[in-house]
Every structure is written in structure tokens, then in C-alpha cells.
Amino acid sequence: MQAIILARRDFRESDQIISFLTLEKGKMEVLAKGVKKIISKNSAHLEPFSYVELEIIKGKELNHLGAVQSIDYFINIRQDLQKSLIAGFIVSLLNKILEIEEKDKRIFILLKSWLKFVNNCSEIKLVMVDGFVVKLLFYLGLDIVSVEKTSRELKKDLTILLEGDWQLIFNLKFEKGEYEKLHRLIYKFLVFQIGKKINDWGSFVFS
């Protein structure tokens, strides 16, 4: 099964619970036994936003992780601090808001395409994160473009973020004040709709 790692958290002395996103079954969690041990073969493949092929072994309470093989480690992201921070934020956001086995193939395809583009582009831009969030919200049934009392200019920009490909979004140019309004609208809409505390990615990465 192909998956993108979202998060890992400690469970007992040397085990971890691994959260990941799959095309077929949405978000899933498995127990990775012994993964915290230095000699563990799987540990390096289970870093957040790694794209892997993994085997799941049926368990009584929790399914167990079997073999793991790396498909794409996104090395260019990991070698760039800002890219790495924001990719970590993106998968953490997905882990926070998606329910277990909430199936939507579009979300897996969205994340995979975003990671591949960011891995190959020259730099990470705030608009790339905002574009991801707008598309994600739409797939979750939350259409920010349709919000009333939004100016015509902002609706136009939001439509581009929703419908445009990553290259188009990457190339967008804005006046500073104009873009700050767009970003704040997206951030506030996300927090209001999700109902959970979410850090403003515009301040903690791009300040």
C-alpha cells in the first residue's frame, strides 16, 4: 500500500504509532514495534511527509506495520529549512483535521502533487501553502470562494488558488497589502471551520 507519512508519536518504550495518508483508505494508523531502536530498519522511512510503500499486518487491537520501502524521500525539501518546516506543517495539519479512514482520493493526490512540486521548485512561497489550504477545504466541503461579503478582487484570487495548478499559483504576483488580506481571510476561515487551534503559517515560517 502506498502512503505518505503524516506523523509519528511514542507508544511504550520503543514503539510508535504511525499516522499516514493512503489513496485507497484515507488516513490510517498502525503500531510500529521497535521503531525507536537505533537498529530499526524502518525508522528512516517513517519521517513525516515521506512517500512509502508499506505492509500492514492485522492485529487484535491495532494493526501492525510490516515492511516499509521508500518511494520518495523528497530530499530537496529536507535540505531546505523553510521547505522542511512548511511541509511538516502541511502533514501535521492533515493529521489534525482528517478522521481515521476518511476516504477522499483527491486529498492524497493533492498532497502528493504538492510535495513533488515543492521538492522541485526554487523556493517555498506563502501562496503555495494558501493554495493547498483552499483546495483542501474545498475537498472537505468548505468552499471559501462562496463566502458572502468577500470582495470581487479577493474572490478572483481565491478562485485562482482553488482552480489553478501549482505552477500558476507559484507565479502569482500580489501587492503586499492585497496579499495580506487574502492570507488572513484563508487562515481565519480555516480556523473557524475546523474549530481547532492552528498556527498561522504566515507568521511562523515567513516572518
Image (cartoon, grey):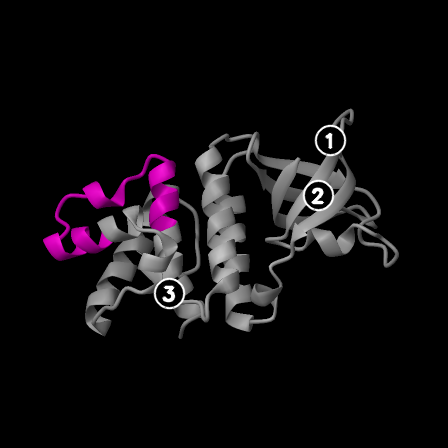
Mark 3 / mark 1, whichever is N-terminal: 1
For the point 57% across and 30% down, which residue is it?
25
Say few, some or many: other residues with alpha carbon within 10 Å of mark 2 (under 14 / 14 to 19 / 20 or more): many
Residue 75 at x, y = what percent? 62, 64
Mark 2 / mark 3, whichever is N-terminal: 2
Residue 90 at x, y = what percent? 49, 54
Q: Is residue 75 above or below residue 188?
A: below
For the point 31% across and 65% down, which residue is it?
171
Q: Secondary structure at mark 1?
A: loop
Could you say which quadrant of the image residue 144 lies in?
top left
Of residues 55 and 148, the one drawn nearer to the viewer in this rendering? 55
> Amino acid under label 2?
Ile
What residue sits right under mark 3 in the picture?
126
**Which span is picked out in magenta?**
133-158
Q: Are marks 2 and 1 in contact (CB under 8 Å)?
A: yes
What residue sits right under mark 2 in the picture?
17
- Quarter of the figure that contains the C terminus: bottom left
Residue 147 at x, y = what percent? 19, 43
Q: Secondary structure at mark 3?
A: helix
